[in-house]
Image: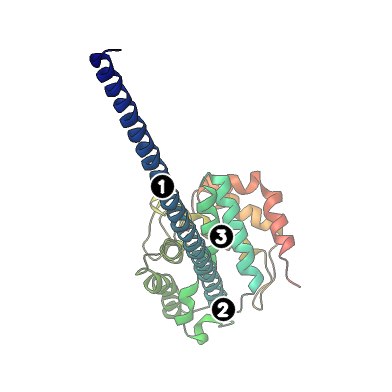
Amino acid sequence: MDVHENKIISEIEALQEDFVKVTEKLIKDVRRQDKIMARSDKRQQLEYDELQRKFTEIAALQKEIEDTQKEVIFTMGAIGESRSKETGNHVKRVAEYSKNFALFYGLSLEDAEMLKQVSPMHDIGKVAIPDSILNKPARLTDEEWLVMKEHANLGYEMLKHSQRPLLKMAAIVAHQHHEKYDGTGYPQGLKGEDIHIYGRITAIADVFDALGSKRAYKDAWPDENIFKLFNEEKGRHFDPKLIDIFFDNIDVFFGIRMKYKEH
């Protein structure tokens, strides 16, 4: 083997040695990077787990706030009704009637559930009406009736400033549940579908329960009398579609009445 060949072999061996060194360094770099990534992944996983834990806590707190808000709304509605000697079951029945009317009308389940929660607030304005008028056993004078009708505006004024969806809906219900489909209701004299569907639903739910319930100042109406009134007031006091819904699903509404009947 001459000198030239030895030189070539030496160069090849040197290249092989360099290749091995470079390869080993690359392997070490890759392994070190893997360890860094593993630590990073672990750190990211820990951060993710912490975020998930905080999210779960926030979600639980949000649910607690929503449940508390619903309970407060129901309680406030019950207080408003109790001032006019209504019962807690009246509030429950109107709530269930309202939800079912909403579903049969075609509103979403979310809206129907919300309407169920806020419908007890329809008479919240009565807390500001004097007892002498609110519970007068005799017919109200014209002046007293004007004061009584103010409960719709008063309820709206109590609730209108809130930006919470439930209370915004409650404000609509309080304001519009005495409007009539033909425009002869109060306090604004709204007509037809200018009355929000929440107001139209609560109106028929409230009247159905009020007529069918015994009070200190009246006996419960016979069902046939209620049916007669509803047919007469279709398109006048009440939304015609809601009257049709009532008669098409009458068993559902009577089932609610039985479930929450007075003891």
Residue under the point 29% across and 23% down: 10
Residue at image mark 2: 84
Badge 3 crowding class, 10 Å Cα cut-off, few under 14, some 14 to 19, many 20 or more, is many
Q: Earlier in the sequence, mark 1 or mark 2?
A: 1
Instruction: Name the mark nearer the viewer: 1 or 3.
Output: 1
Disc 3, SS: helix
Residue at image mark 3: 116
Q: Nearer the viewer, residue 112 or 13?
A: 13
Q: Residue furthest left?
A: 4
The residue type indicated by label 1 comes to Met
The residue type indicated by label 3 comes to Lys
Q: Earlier in the sequence, mark 1 or mark 3?
A: 1
Q: Nearer the viewer, residue 86 or 69?
A: 69
Residue at image mark 1: 37
The residue type indicated by label 2 comes to Ser
> Where's the N terminus, which quadrant?
top left
How far separated are the C-alphas under marks 1 and 2?
70 Å
Up the image or down, 184 lies above or below 77; here it is above
Label 3 near label 2: C-beta < 8 Å?
no
Up the image or down, 138 lies above or below 175; here it is below
Disc 2, SS: loop
Image coords of residue 165 (percent x, y)? 42, 61
In-image side of 252 versus 91 (left or right): right
Count of number-bearing discs: 3
